[in-house]
Image (cartoon, rainbow, N blue to C red):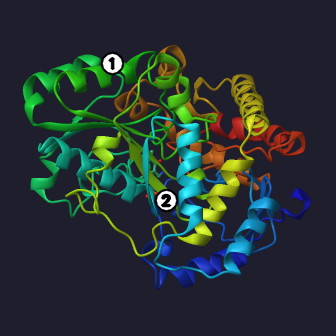
Amino acid sequence: GSDTMDGRTTTSEDAFRQAQGVIPGGVNSPVRAFGSVGGTPRFLASALGAYVTDVDGHEYVDLVGSWGPALLGHGHPVVLDAVHEAVSRGLSFGAPTVTEGELAEEIRRRVPAAHRVRLVSTGTEATMTALRLARGFTGRDLVLKFAGCYHGHVDALLVAAGSGLATLALPGSAGVSAAVAAETIVVPYNDLDAVAAAFAEHGERIAAVITEAAPANMGVVPPLPGFNGEVRRIAHEHGALFVQDEVLTGFRVGPAGWWGFEGQAEGWEPDLLTFGKVIGGGLPVAAVAGRVDVMEQLAPLGPVYQAGTLSGNPVATAAGLATLRLADDAVYARVDAASAQLRSAVSQALAAASVPHAIQWAGSLFSIMFGAEAAAQGARDYAAVQATESWRYAPFFHALLEAGVSAPPSAFEAWFVSAAHDDEAVGRIVDALPAAAAAAASA
Ligand code: PMP
């Protein structure tokens, strides 16, 4: 419990030093390095329910949730049983298995817009394949994305991207060729005029618009009402496809993802969707899905190539299938309730410490935007997010960490709650907030 929080991080420090000597930056994904908040990243030894334990024996209430997959909380016994059962039958076959079809079917049952589903291993592969499909289907080259949206580390999508690039304040990535970058058009989020202007200028060359269903990689910046549907309409008017990236939101914000709130409710479908995170339950599974005529361009049926040695891996798909089957209405109700409790507690603590802020949220995903401007009008695009007082996040984060609460180590990432965040776990976070708010105030 938090009484073990003696502040010693010797084992993490040693491990970090060792790792830095062999792994660039000591981490295998940049945001894990604590670059923008400072200090030593906690090396984790185990995770169970709403809690993670580091190698020095400290337990934290976890608000990272492996960056999305842990919808049920960590180590759900039914998911672990499914994994153990799958492991006992072998780790990888490189041949089709029944579980792959069952997982694809479960995805389509919940999101009927996913008429055909191709399983891959990471969200990056899913969005990369979506773009290749859109280009193959339309015979066009350009892609339109929104500033601050992150779609994985696909070359063409690292232009003005969020997530780790936002954390490190990078405009894009070195190593992306000028030719590739020139095929990506970037416009501000929530700006329909900018979308219309880009199509007016380049409409005949644009293969697809790709957008996070509800952006959560520049902090959470929800779409204005009707935005997604209108972007889709404009794209279609010009013969381009509309690709909705639900790698993060899919099966997390609700049983049918963000599309369940908008497209399904309003009666429209994206041409392509991408999924990841929750559909693997903590193991590597992601998917590209959508219209039959577009998806059937994929090899072996069509000319658009895509493949993977470990695609549809039997252990990973067993974890994903068990996770989705457990993610019933009660799970979403608990996640939503925990998120609502936390949003109001964070806001109250910050208000009590006189820290101007806005809590921005989309379904159960939320993040804090610091500063009077955000408090007054919210942050609706990446420029507004970058103008927030995000430096207040580092002391806020460290005060939480010292009190046994592991928030995401970046102001530009969403907080991930799970169905395992019960009153006890939420209570521990709430208890830690006043000191964190005071730290944010004095930053
Ligand atoms: N799209 C979105 C919206 C994401 O949030 C992410 C990962 N955070 C990705 C794509 C990339 O997924 P992966 O990290 O599995 O490649």
Q: Position of residue 351 (x, y in %)?
A: 70, 22
- For badge 2, the amino acid type reads Gly
Q: Position of residue 87 (x, y in %)?
A: 68, 78
| Relative to 198, residue 299 above or below | below
Q: Position of residue 389 (x, y in %)?
A: 49, 33
Q: Which mark is residue 230?
A: 1
Q: Which mark is residue 341?
A: none
Quick one: label 1 or label 2, which is nearer the N terminus? 2
Residue 319 as seen in the image, left or right of residue 138: right
Q: Nearer the viewer, mark 1 or mark 2?
A: 1
- Residue at 78% from the left image edge and 68% from the top image edge: 81
* Residue sitting nearer the eye, 218 or 420: 420
Q: Measure how far apart labels 1 and 2 are at the Cα level.
A: 37 Å
- Residue at 70% from the left image edge and 43% from the top image edge: 417
The N terminus sits in image quarter: bottom right
Residue 413 as seen in the image, left or right of residue 292: right
- Residue at 70% from the left image edge and 29% from the top image edge: 343
Residue labelled 1 has its Cβ within 8 Å of some atom of ligand 1: no
The residue singled out by tag 2 in the image is 35
Q: In this orientation, does residue 281 appear? A: no
Question: Helix or strand or loop: what does disc 1 sit on?
Answer: helix
- For badge 1, the amino acid type reads Glu
